[in-house]
Amino acid sequence: MADTWGQRGIQNSDTGVQERLSKIGSTVLQGYHVAIASEDLGAIAPKMNEIDEELRGFAYEGVGMGLAQRDLLTPSSENRMATFVAGDGAAYHNWVYVGLGLMLARAGLPIKPHLEKLNFARSWLAVDGYGYYQGMFHWQDSLDNQVISEQISGYTRSVFDQGLGRSIWFIGGGDVNHIARTIDTFAPNRRQDLWGGVGYACAYAGGAERATIEALTNTAGVYRYQLAQGTAYAAKSRQSLGNHSVYTELACQVLWKMGVDAVVESLAANGEALESQTWQHYRARVFHPVRTTLAV
């Protein structure tokens, strides 16, 4: 990560962000190595329980990567990933399927054939992970040159861009101006989803101090609503598992002027059920009803 920040000219504007994001990367790899080394699927969850609960979702993304790799390289009579999420990994199935997208991107495989095997909700999780990986590890193509596969089009591109937006938070390393400049190079019809991804990562991955989040909010300008939507989805993701984070709480306080629980309750009161597995549906439903709730 440090090398990537240096290559992209990222300033060390918020060391807390950079330290936090490096730790998250290590946690993803920890889950990945557990998954590829565990012949017994039942041995994975106990090892995940040893990881700090607040970071555990990232470890399960790594588990998804590892299980997907094993299913691709050494197929068995049962799909390891499907078996795992139907059992011990059920609570973290969202993160596991994000890991599938990470692995497909890492392996350079076309994503469309794999999406056709998944149900609606899980397919978008994989696309989100695919977009995130492209931004993180192929940023010259995906962010600087904005290369995108022909398979990623229409509705799928919106979900891909949300994942790409998450990577921009990581790649940006707390440099708010750099994050905004990166998004501004994209066509206007892609910026909403990119800012939504940044909002989710800012709140769920976190690492930023209040001043950084406030600066990010101001810099987002007309896209601050999408930034806040991503934050709300992160709040729901945290709440659904009960693994609260000071970073998610802080982001909600800055963007919504209320805490995590109040954000989720406020949205529910507007008749908007935020289902954690359907970010894109949440985004479409929630934008107009809650717009007036945002901090100004």
Image (cartoon, rainbow, N blue to C red):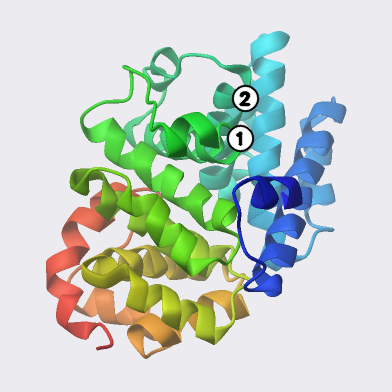
Amino acid of disc 1: Phe
Q: Secondary structure at mark 1?
A: helix
Spot occupied by residue 125 in the image (x, y as percentages of width and height): 44, 39
Spot occupied by residue 44 in the image (x, y as percentages of width and height): 79, 40
Numbered disc in front, either 2 or 1: 1
Question: Observer-nearest residue: 29 or 46?
Answer: 29
Q: Is residue 70 left or right of residue 235?
A: right
Q: Which residue is mark 1?
A: 137
How many numbered discs, if any? 2
Question: Observer-nearest residue: 145 or 1?
Answer: 145
Spot occupied by residue 179 in the image (x, y as percentages of width and height): 45, 59
Label 2 or label 1, whichever comes before in sequence order: 2
- Whole-number angstrom distance, CA of label 2 to CA of label 1: 9 Å
Q: Secondary structure at mark 2?
A: helix
Count neighbours of disc 2 (C-alpha within 10 A) and say few if under 14, some if 14 to 19, many if 20 or more. Answer: some
- Contact, CB < 8 Å: mark 2 with mark 1? yes
Spot occupied by residue 239 in the image (x, y as percentages of width and height): 50, 71
Q: Is residue 51 left or right of residue 179?
A: right
Q: Is residue 69 visible?
A: yes
Q: Which residue is mark 2?
A: 106
From what the image shows, is residue 258 above or below residue 127?
below
